[in-house]
Image (cartoon, coloured by chain):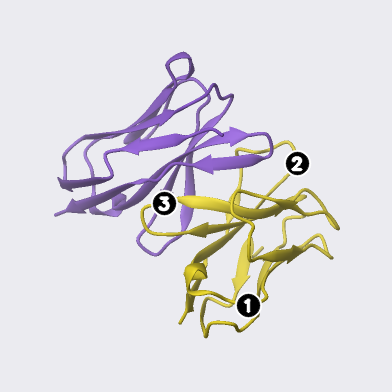
Chain colours: A yellow, B purple
Amino acid sequence: NAGVTQTPKFRVLKTGQSMTLLCAQDMNHEYMYWYRQDPGMGLRLIHYSVGEGTTAKGEVPDGYNVSRLKKQNFLLGLESAAPSQTSVYFCASRRQGSIYEQYFGPGTRLTVT
Amino acid sequence: GIQVEQSPPDLILQEGANSTLRCNFSDSVNNLQWFHQNPWGQLINLFYIPSGTKQNGRLSATTVATERYSLLYISSSQTTDSGVYFCAVVNTDKLIFGTGTRLQVFP
């Protein structure tokens, strides 16, 4: 049981490049979340999903797209990376009805130059 | 939207000291959680505490929902307590995080 995994762990992009971050969970959780963490600002919600095939915007969705084609995977895409998207990205998942039991992945450190 | 503020932003302690971290929130909430982010970045759920007091070893937490604050107490701190402590309030399906308290415990 691997829990929540994130791929890749580190990435450096040039401005304008695109990439996809993958989050996978093996706990059969319905809900999945993408957060970004910047120094001094805590975690801010980018997008989330309440089930396979559904997505919703969070607090800071601009510049990101997401997809949840399979229940166990939640993808975060950057179509045209900007330096302001330099951050640490965390994925989380939880069961329906269990908001207080979010399980977090190890994070992806992204640098955009 | 709901605002969540934490204080102090930074805390430096010597091993064995006690500390209190505070979380204020701007609106009535039904649920509040405390997390610890260790120096390697991993987030660990410490407490789910919508009201009242809970204790887990050297850590305890108290939430006074009517006055919109929560406190996290760390007693006899150890170097392994170092990291960032976040509180988060529940808003429908989402968590809203505070800005965190960075704790450094020195031997």
Residue A5 vs B27, above or below: the answer is below
Label 1 and label 3: CA atoms lie apart by 23 Å
Residues at discs 1 and 3 in contact (Cβ within 8 Å): no
Q: Name the side, left or right, on which A87 lies relative to A30.
A: left
Q: Which residue is mark 3?
A: A41
Amino acid type of the residue tagged 3 in the rendering? Met
Q: Where, quadrant-wise, is the C terminus of chain A in this rendering?
A: bottom left
Question: Could you say which disc has been placed on residue B100 in the image?
Answer: none
Residues at discs 1 and 2 in contact (Cβ within 8 Å): no
Residue depicted at x 59% and y 34%: B90
Residues at discs 3 and 2 in contact (Cβ within 8 Å): no
Q: Which is nearer the N-term, disc 3 or disc 2?
A: 3
Percent position of residue B54, x then y? 44, 26
Badge 2 element: loop
Q: Which residue is mark 2?
A: A96
Percent position of residue A101, x then y? 61, 42
Q: Which is nearer the N-term, disc 1 or disc 3?
A: 3
Q: Name the side, left or right, on which A71 lies relative to B19.
A: right
Percent position of residue A29, x then y? 74, 51
Q: Is residue A73 visible?
A: no
Residue depicted at x 26% and y 39%: B8
Q: Which residue is mark 1?
A: A80
Subunit bearing disc 1: A
Q: Name the side, left or right, on which B105 lies relative to A12.
A: left
Residue placed most toward the observer, A48 or A78: A78
Percent position of residue B26, x then y? 47, 27
